[in-house]
Amino acid sequence: MFLSHRSWPELAEYAATESLAVVPLGSTEQHGPHLPEGTDYLIAEALARAATDRTGHLCTPPIPVGVSSHHRQFHGTMWVEPPVFRDYVESLSRNLTSHGIDRIVYVNAHGGNVSHLREVGRRLHEDGTAYAIEWMWDESIPDLIDAVFETTGPHGGPKETAMIMHIAEELVREDRLEAAHDGGAVFDSDAERVHGATTFYDSIENSPNGVFGDQTDATPEIGERLFEAAADQLVALLEWLDAQPFADLLPKPHLDPQPGSGA
Ligand SMILES: [Zn+2]
């Protein structure tokens, strides 16, 4: 059920029996010479809508701009400061609870958002408002990604290229796949460390054109496999979360003895 396309009486019917919401989040940032800047939120929205079409759960409109200042040197990259992002997502999540939502899955497709979404989930959990968890699509199918690509990459690589080929093929500049590969890099976070310290902050320090891995390995067929496998994982997560009693999702009480407990 896509919130943007529904009227309020339909949402009232949903609220009468359900309390779960899915919030897709991504980024609008450079994804190399071959992919659109909206790659991450397009992936998040497509997966969130496919999974909620199957389970019947509520899907909100996507949040298309995230924490992306590490791509700031490349044209078109948009970002907000991390505290602004956290406060915005927290406010939006608390707003959902006013309509009866008590559990949320952040369907995320941008690595830069992960720690901030975890922080928002922690805030909501600690005060018992809601149970909100972050789900990153590629983290749900690591073995499949390793099996289908020789040289994957954390950003703008074959996995995101294949996914966009499947979701919106007209947005992939197929004639620039070679250029993406030749002008990019193979990311090895261990090799980038100096005496144990991570010394880089921006993607341009590791990749001249901003992307990693071998994009020429991507095909729409592989994209479809990745998409369906990740959607299966998300459906299973939503069904699991839906089945949990809310009391089981709340923080555990402090151990005894406590002052005044009489113990
Ligand atoms: Zn991306």
Image (cartoon, rainbow, N blue to C red):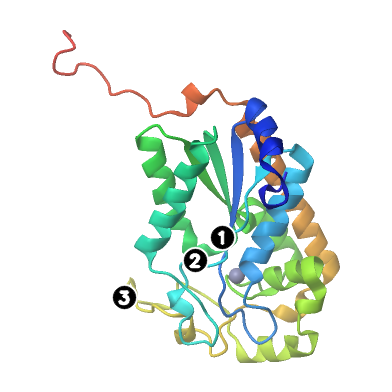
* Quarter of the figure with the C terminus: top left
> On the image, which quarter does residue 212 sit in?
bottom right
Distance, label 3 to label 1, CA atoms, is 38 Å
Q: Which residue is mark 1?
A: 63
Q: Secondary structure at mark 3?
A: loop
Q: Pointers 1 and 2 in contact (CB under 8 A)?
A: yes
Q: Which residue is mark 2?
A: 66
Front position in the image: 235 or 79: 79
Q: Is residue 63 visible?
A: yes
* Quarter of the figure with the N terminus: top right
Q: Is mark 1 within 8 Å of ligand 1?
A: no
Residue type beneath disc 1: Ile
Q: Is residue 129 left or right of residue 239?
A: left
Does 208 appear above or below 236?
A: below
Q: Is residue 38 left or right of residue 50?
A: left
Label whose residue precedes the other's in the sequence (3 or 2) = 2
Mark 2 is surrounded, within 10 Å at the Cα level, by few (under 14), some (14 to 19) or many (20 or more) other residues, namely many
Where residue 178 sits: x, y (%)? 73, 89
Residue type beneath disc 3: His
Point out the quarter of the image occupied by ligand 1: bottom right
- Residue at the spot 68% in from the left edge and 79% down from the top edge: 35
